[in-house]
Amino acid sequence: MLKRIFIILLIATTASAQTSADLEKRLDEMKQQIEILTKEIEALKMGEQKQAAQADVSQYGLGAAASKVYRAEPGVSFGGYGEFGYFNPQHGTPSADFVRGVLYTGYKFSDRVLFNSELEVEHGTTEIGGSASLEFAYLDYLIKPQANVRAGLVLLPMGIINEQHEPTAYLGARRPEVEDRILPTTWSELGAGVFGDVGSITYRGYLVTGLDSTRFSAEDSIHEGKQSGSEALAHDLAVTGRVDWHPFEGALVGASVYSGGSGQGRGYKGNVTLADVHADAKFRGVSLRGVFARGHIGDAAAISEQNKQTIGSSTGGWYVEGGYDLPTRLAVTPYIRYERLDTQRRVPLGFERDPENDRRITTFGFAFKPISQTVIKADYQIIHTRAGNNNNQLNLALGYIF
């Protein structure tokens, strides 16, 4: 219809002044211009109809925002999350912190090949105690749902929080200490491996660079031994993997394992073995989660002498957590979590345990989600140590994903 109107107007305005040959030439030019304009209008309409991928579902073990690139159109994909916190310990000075700000950047080369990354800034600025680092950056080659290949700086598939660490994905203003001191988070290493879904079973397995024992500590065990792809020593490598069973939507039961050296050519192997079993379920407003973890550090005596502090030869911890979405118009979820952990469950002969590292923590509070991509959390932690030096704490947090 649009073409006909332009043609009629053209004929009416030029018929008296143009020869038939000139008119036909001018008409052909106008038709070409109309064709170009029509295609551009159609392309604009198609662009308006396309919607950006939403941060509303988890894929391949990653959080809802971290996995957006898998649902995006070919080309660049962006996402992210952030956390603000206020922490008021019973013994100590209250603090407010921009805990972390994250930008996910991905690029989908095709339906089979994509790049995904997470760039994180902790504590607001690198000028006052903060840091900026890549949490992961990898290439995927998607062969079929049952078998795919991943290589680069990968998140280790241990526990629940390490891969699912976005603030809307867990209850609590602070992450569970079991999944920080016993199973480090956020933990990434350079490596490659496979992943996939086989019916109700999902799996991931990688060969990665090992830990660096020179950074182990009595309080945090292997946490600071993560190399995170920063000029990583690769004399000792490690293998890690997990298998999860999803009996129904919103539920999983599984296990993870890690094993590899940490000596990195220093005359001892320092083999570190971690294992955990975990479960997570959401059903009719009820949320339940639990993790049981154990760790063993070989050559702990040599590492303790090297680091001039007692490194536990055995570590362990567990926690259970529950929440309930109140049947109100407001999205409010009261929750409670109990955890027990000890980074010096056993120590090498001739070294002494520090009872301060044997901790029991009870956390109770509530989470409020104005929308599904934002969360406000408030909780109180009752912290007991076997040494008797208790330090309870009030926590407030604001989180978002996009």
Image: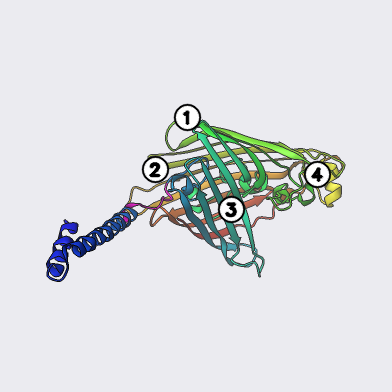
Residue at point 66% right, 69% down? 128
Disc number for residue 264: 4
Eye-nearest disc, 2 or 3: 2
Disc number for residue 382: 3
Q: Are marks 1 and 2 in contact (CB under 8 Å)?
A: no
Residue at point 45% right, 45% down? 323
Residue 276 in view (yes/no): no
Residue count near mark 1 (Cα–Cα under 10 Å), binned few <14, some 14–19, many ≥20: few
Q: Which residues are magenta?
A: 48-56
Q: CA distance from mark 3 to mark 4?
A: 39 Å
Q: CA distance from mark 1 to mark 2?
A: 22 Å
Residue count near mark 2 (Cα–Cα under 10 Å), binned few <14, some 14–19, many ≥20: few
Magenta stretch encompasses residue 51? yes
Q: Amino acid at mark 2?
A: Gly
Q: Amino acid at mark 4?
A: Gln
Q: CA distance from mark 1 to mark 3?
A: 38 Å
Give the x, y percent position of residue 129.
67, 66
Residue at point 80% right, 50% down? 214
Residue that protrudes farthest toward the top in the picture: 199
Dot 1 corresponds to which residue? 200
| Image position of 300 with respect to 186: above or below | above
Dot 2 corresponds to which residue? 285
Q: CA distance from mark 4 to mark 2?
A: 48 Å
Is 326 on the left or on the right of 376, as rendered?
left
Residue count near mark 4 (Cα–Cα under 10 Å), binned few <14, some 14–19, many ≥20: many
